[in-house]
Amino acid sequence: MARRVSLPAADDLFRPTGPGVRAVPDVVEEPVVEEPEKPRKSGASGRIRHDEKMTVYVTSDELMAIEQARLTLRGEHRLAVDRGRLVREAISVVLADLAAHGDDSMLVQRLRDER
């Protein structure tokens, strides 16, 4: 007969050791360090906590292409990024191109070609 082991709760592990000391400190946001201005700054959020979520469905071929791009970035360029960051950067690049070139942007051209 399997017996369930009882583990201590977080409050037991991180209890205050003195008056006025909190077991778990308030979360303090780290200051955002501004990067030097690049030509046509990407505007992607990078490695921060994201409060919003959006679900996007992709085909298996699209998912394989994203994963292949991630592995290429890691293997050939020594950039370890997750799929979410890769997609956020790609979206940022496309939106910057749209803002800069409008009707001549790659996004407008590709969407027109789909019609």
Image (cartoon, rainbow, N blue to C red):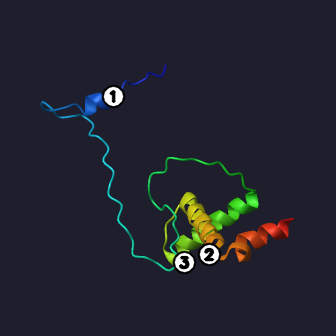
Determine which of the numbered discs, if any, sits on residue 76 in the image. Answer: 3
Residue sitting nearer the eye, 87 or 33: 33
Residue sitting nearer the eye, 75 or 33: 33
Q: Rounded to the nearest whole Å, what is the CA distance between mark 2 and mark 1?
A: 54 Å
So how many labels did they put on this image? 3
Q: Rounded to the nearest whole Å, what is the CA distance between mark 1 and mark 3?
A: 44 Å
Q: Position of residue 24 (x, y in %)?
A: 27, 37
Direction bottom: furthest residue: 39
Vertical side of 58 occupied by 15: above or below: above
Label 1: which secondary element: loop
Residue highlighted by disc 2: 100
Which comes before the other along the chain, label 1 or label 3?
Answer: 1
Residue highlighted by disc 1: 9
Which comes before the other along the chain, label 2 or label 1?
Answer: 1
Residue for point 54% across, 61% down: 85
- The quarter in which the C terminus is drawn is bottom right
